[in-house]
Image (cartoon, rainbow, N blue to C red):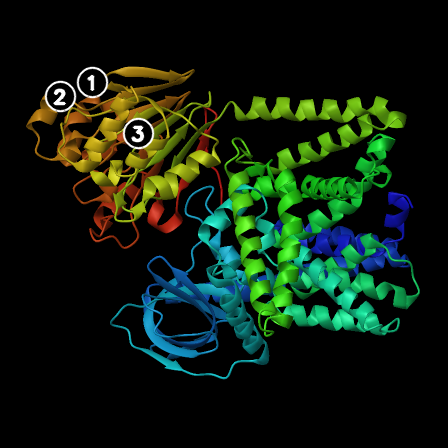
Amino acid sequence: MGLMLKLNRAPFIFILSAFLLGISFSWFPVWMVVPLYIISLLLFAFWWRNVYVFAAIVLCLLGYVNTEIRRDGIDDNYRTSFALNDSRISVTGLVDEIVERENGYRFRLSSPLIKFNTISIDFPSILLFAETNQEISVGMKVTTTGQYFQIQGPRNPGEFDFKSFYGRKGIFGRIYTDETDMMTIESFELTKIQTVQQWIRKVFKEKVGQQFGLLTALILGDKTSVDPEIREDFTNTGVIHVLAVSGLHVGYVLIILMVMAKLFRLPWGWDRLLIIIGLIFFCFLTGGKASVIRASLMAGIYMMTPITNREGNLWNTIFLSAFILLLYDPLYIKELGFLLSYAAVASIILFYQLIQDILPDRLRVNNIQSKSLQFIFGLFLVSFSAQIGTLPITAFYFGRIPIISLIANIIIVPVIGILVAVGFCILFFGWIPFIGDWIGESAWFITKSISWIADMFAQVPYGVIEVNQFSMINILTYFIGLGMIFIFFMNKYRKYAIYPGLLIGSIFIWKIAISSQYLNIIYMDVGQGDAILVRLPNKETLLIDGGQRFGSKDYGELVIKPMLKYFNINRINYLVMTHPHSDHIGGLISISESVPVDTAFDTYLDYDSWAYKSVMEQLTVDSTVIIHPMPGQVISISQDCYLTFFTPDPNFVKHTRNVNNASIVMKLFYGSTSYLFTGDLEREGEAQIIQFNEALKSDVLKVGHHGSKTSSSDYFLQRVLPKIAVVSVGYKNKFHHPNEDVMNRISQYAETIHRTDQSGALWLQSDGSKIWEVHWK
């Protein structure tokens, strides 16, 4: 049956499309939604007798209202969490997950009751962090006190949005306890499912030993005991999906249930009932994970189709299951697992047959004589077909394409299937002497083999391609290109392949022409420190300072490296170290060790600190050109883009005792726009550069010394006259920066003041004539 005919016989494609349209309206601004619904009402007025128009409007409205209700509930919890932020509270809740961390434990409490002063607050769930476990286990009731913090969204471009991720799971805050906080623990009767889960973990640990973590992840979806190295290897080889209990595992369970139905010789109809009950039990066993429910729902619907005396239609099954899930929670549409699951299944159904059709007859799976080769090649085509659909999603969310996964999946996925089967054998027959031990040892050997195979593939050079900032335009181009390839291999339509090719060429030309004009400046949020990334119009990079490094917190690793990766930067052309204090150069230690730097600008100070010496030694080893700029010096760094330096004056630097006043102060010009960077310059240093008068005038000012009372004097601001002022400062820092009087003074000159402690990073973009903010969140 042809693809179009199958889609025509899938009515839920229409139902789901109308419902998705309504969901999408929920993210549109009101001024766009109102006209759209006015148009819908006009359509209804003219074609109210048309059942399709009526159904489409109703479904669209249902999707919109359902999403708004769900989002309003989350927004209410966000507001409550914001009001509680950084407050001392007490909490009581049931432990339903325990994760061991490097410096303690993380507990997830369900249905927590939070008490703040005289107010009691309910949240669906909350995260509790403690230094010790105190013999806590799943199902126990815990009461404790601690410091409450809301879960924040991304602070810099390219960072993961934990706020949205946890918010959709009903988690809006986290509580930190220390040794002074008393914790009361009460035993609580486990549910029957929790009892079964605990028994399964115990059996696996007894029979398999330290390698039991992989089995608990595959059977229960509990990844807390999986070796971090295995996780990393699975991620790098593109098989991390096997750790998330999903369609693959439901497929194995479905096979086991079908075999059981055959063994017990259940009559037709009753075998379907056994499968449905088994799938429902598996959903409960894995904790009702969304991925398991998705796959079980698809499998259940398809298995029940023959009872209705209708021919099974996989497309209708997919659309119906997606509609049911989105009706329950429309925010599933933003879950990565939801997108990957349906993209993989739809891609297999669509592309597997298309690939078969364009292959020579002798290479088609059914025509291969060897059964083993037929199985291997068939598995390869299934994996390849799934990756066609999931590749753009993976690239968009993770910024990488694991090429090696095509081969890794062929080997690891079947072995994972064997391990799942062996895992169930342990549960069914592990109690039998000798046999149980033999099965356990087999599971240990298979687990070690999987770990070795994954590690081997992870070591393959160029097995992963980095593709950061894979945008919606890239996704569109990808699918147009995909269509062009399939059209080219179809002799009947080959002559039409040139049209999508021309469209792709046009998209790339316009994208290059538009993007190459812009200057991008990102004032990063690095806490109580400075770090600014400048992406020049010619795609070269200027990095100004690198944030701080103290203890295990290295802003070079935490913020700057991910930022460089986000912009596909593997080389720093110009590095400016405004002055050698650790809150400005601490993060540059890890950056200089991993990213080559062509030219570095430094002050005339011979500063005696480990951080400064470490950076300078690494730059020397890498043969980086070190420049000590002079006041008034102008350096061109790109077409229409140059730097003018106002400090440091070597004579002034030698006589000042304040390192802050030895900061490099420079102005970046692009076209008619200008940006002044001041490091930690204070009043004494400002007095030295006011002689430049009009030359100091700038559109954007990076406020000196984090808004300290010792900076931003009135006579200095009178000469700069900034339109935008940026204060790089840490939340509730011990120095109480920025100073309120300084902020009031700056507000008399600047139209806009941006504080990184309040709003995160600021991303400015310019075409050389005007400046605008990029709303990256």
Q: Is residue 759 above or below residue 362?
A: below
Q: Quadrant of residue 713?
A: top left
Q: Earlier in the sequence, mark 1 or mark 2?
A: 1
- Taking depth in this image into account, of 172 and 45 the one nearest to the observer is 172
> Is residue 695 visible in the rendered structure shown here?
no
Please tell me how many numbered marks the rendered image carries. Answer: 3
* Residue 432 location (% of width, % of height): 60, 74
Q: Nearer the viewer, residue 140 or 730?
A: 140
The residue under label 2 is 650
**Residue identified by numbered label 1:** 630
The residue where tag 3 is placed is: 676
Looking at the rendered image, the disc whose residue lies closer to the viewer, 3 or 2, is 2
Are the residues tagged 1 and 3 within 8 Å (C-beta)?
A: no
Residue at 43 percent across and 15 percent down: it is 639
Nearest the eye: 333 or 110: 110
Q: Give neighbour class at mark 2: few <14, some 14-19, many 20+ (Cα, 10 Å).
A: some
Question: Does 549 sit above or below residue 432?
Answer: above
Q: CA distance from mark 1 to mark 2?
A: 8 Å
At 31% from the left and 16% from the top, the residue drawn is 635
User: At x 60% / y 51%, what residue is drawn?
Assistant: 241
Q: Secondary structure at mark 2?
A: helix
